[in-house]
């Protein structure tokens, strides 16, 4: 790969074995002057810049460090986590959720500004789908309308937006020495309640069925972080419909996104917070 050779010259590194290849992004082990690093390439220049801003914004608060970057090469040179085990290796779901809560607490001490996408912009696919809506769907109109109503209400009532990771789940939290740190942030400005959604959705059947696991995790994160469970659940509905819209854009199965919306909808109904 020509860009790898260019990165070796630009960063004065030796690129080793690949770690992951997902969505056009390649991650490699790298070394420089006997220091173990990670090279990430394949993002577009805007996404590289946002990831750098986000990691720098979180610096000292539980994120991996940026060593160097080159927007023209769409390349990031990053600190390597040691031993680098993901949070998914903690199979006790209660313990994993406690760790997740501690990571969120460390990441969000203050508002950080920069070149970040707003949460409303992040959810733009819902608006695009709504503009092209036809009687045939395919998304259920009731969930679409519910998501739009929740999104508008949640955005307008967010008094203290913060810098969000935007994709904080088990695989993006790694063990580094005696602490847990995050990798791969999206860098979004918005409501802190949105930050917990992706964790709630990953490994949904650990130590219980999906509804039981969601309820347990919701109780734990709201207590640990002092968040409003109703806002989290409403963001969950929005996220489910957003995932369905993204799936339609990609030509993949949209049903899982609606399943997510329905799961958070059930939580709202059982907790007495649903007006639908």
Image (cartoon, rainbow, N blue to C red):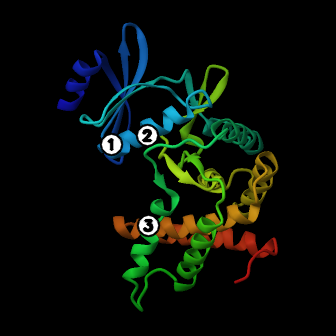
Q: Which of 17 and 237 is in front in this view?
A: 237
Give the SS element for disc 3: helix
* Quadrant that contains the C terminus: bottom right
Give the SS element for disc 1: loop
Q: Mark 1 Cα within 10 Å, few/some/many (few <14, many 20+)?
A: some
Residue 93 placement, left or right of 17 = right
Give the SS element for disc 2: helix
Mark 3 or mark 2: name the one nearer the start of the chain. Answer: 2
Number of numbered discs on residues: 3
Q: Mark 3 points at which residue?
A: 124
Residue 140 placement, left or right of 180 = left
Residue 168 higher or lower than 57, as above or below: below
Q: Name the residue under label 2.
A: 51
**Visible in this render: residue 253?**
no
Q: Mark 3 Cα within 10 Å, few/some/many (few <14, many 20+)?
A: some
* Quadrant that contains the N terminus: top left
Q: How far apart are marks 1 and 2 (CA)?
A: 10 Å
């Amino acid at each position: 790969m020509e860009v790898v050779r260019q990165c070796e010259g630009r960063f004065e590194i030796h690129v080793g074995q690949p770690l992951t290849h997902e969505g056009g992004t390649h991650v490699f082990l790298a070394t420089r002057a006997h220091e173990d690093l990670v090279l990430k390439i394949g993002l577009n220049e805007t996404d590289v810049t946002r990831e750098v801003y986000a990691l720098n914004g979180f610096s000292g608060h539980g994120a991996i460090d940026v060593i160097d970057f080159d927007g023209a090469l769409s390349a990031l040179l990053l600190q390597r986590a040691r031993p680098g085990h993901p949070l998914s290796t903690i199979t006790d779901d209660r313990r994993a959720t406690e760790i997740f809560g501690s990571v969120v607490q460390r990441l969000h001490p203050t508002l950080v500004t920069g070149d970040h996408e707003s949460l409303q912009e992040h959810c733009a696919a819902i608006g695009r789908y709504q503009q092209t809506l036809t009687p045939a769907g395919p998304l259920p109109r009731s969930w679409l309308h519910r998501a739009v109503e929740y999104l508008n209400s949640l955005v307008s009532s967010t008094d203290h937006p913060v810098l969000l990771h935007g994709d904080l789940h088990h695989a993006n939290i790694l063990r580094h020495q005696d602490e847990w740190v995050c990798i791969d942030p999206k860098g979004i400005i918005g409501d802190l309640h949105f930050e917990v959604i992706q964790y709630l959705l990953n490994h949904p059947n650990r130590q219980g069925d999906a509804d039981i696991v969601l309820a347990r995790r919701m109780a734990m994160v709201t207590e640990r972080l002092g968040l409003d469970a109703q806002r989290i659940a409403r963001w969950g509905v929005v996220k489910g419909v957003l995932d369905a819209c993204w799936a339609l854009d990609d030509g993949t199965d949209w049903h899982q996104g609606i399943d997510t919306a329905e799961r958070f909808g059930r939580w709202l109904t059982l907790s007495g917070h649903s007006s639908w």
